[in-house]
Amino acid sequence: MYTYAMLSRDGGREQNEDFIGMAKCGEQVCFALADGLGGHKGGADASRLVVEDILEDFRNRGEVSGEYLRRCFRDSQEHLLEEQKKQEQEDGMKTTLVVLLADGEQAVWGHIGDSRLYYFENKRQKARTLDHSVPQMLVAAGEITEKEIRGHEDRNRLLHVMGMEEEDEYYCIAPGREQGKRTEFLLCTDGFWEWIEEKEMEKTLKRSQTPKEWLDAMEEKVKENGEGKEMDNYSAIAVFFEKGD
């Protein structure tokens, strides 16, 4: 059994370039979230295109496997590159992407860019995706700490995104993970996680009975911490899975 809640806000910007959605295929579910880059409508078009591509494919022939998810990323990347050429937007239509596939027994996720997926078991964080960004690279090199990613002067410098023509495939597909009795997921753009730390995610999760309660509590903290600062669009998807006895 699963329950979920979603939100997407402009954060005070003129346009919301984020795009989110979910799809079902039998007992399997797919959640996708993207943060468009490039402005002038190009980022919004890019995020919508990749999410809608993946959700449509999942409805028709979805499966919870790394091989299937890798193909989804590859196909949507090719479609985005084609659309860039049609619209003469090679420099303007790019986007991050994070996708979760699950059936209550197993979960698979993938990402590119700095939109994140957080995985919790029994309301404790167990894993998160690693950003394709300059600050995350500095963390890997031991030059800064994880906590210093937020607010770093190069935080918006991304190394890999959808719509960037590259010889290799840089999106990351996590190994399939068997789900426990109670698991929780958070998919979110950088405009969301920038203003709420992981300890606060856990704290609000422990007080929440539903995904909506959790999102509402986190959004309150996001708005409080971002008030009076240059906030970006922010989006998030919360999903709870619970196995029966």
Image (tube, grey):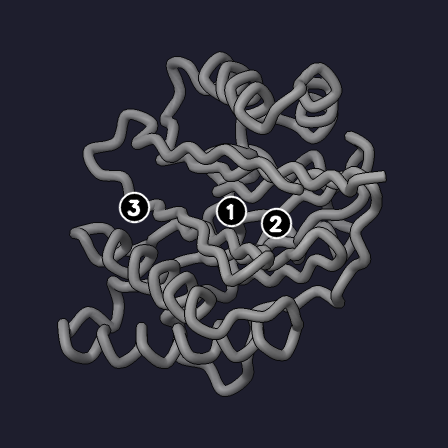
In front: mark 3 or mark 1? Answer: 3
Label 2, secondary structure: give it.
Answer: helix
Type of amino acid under label 2: Pro
Q: In which quarter of the image is the N terminus?
A: top right
Circle 2 residue: 135
Type of amino acid under label 1: Asp
Residue 224 in percent (x, y) is at 49, 12
Q: Is disc 1 surrounded by few (<14), some (14 to 19) or many (20+) residues within 10 Å?
A: few
Q: Distance of mark 3 from mark 1, alpha carbons?
A: 20 Å
Circle 1 residue: 154
The quarter holding residue 205 reads top right
Looking at the image, tell me whether mark 3 or mark 2 is earlier in sequence order. Answer: 3
Circle 3 residue: 17
Label 3, secondary structure: give it.
Answer: loop
Number of marks present in the image shown: 3
**Left or right: where 148 falls relative to 219:** right
Q: Is disc 2 surrounded by few (<14), some (14 to 19) or many (20+) residues within 10 Å?
A: many
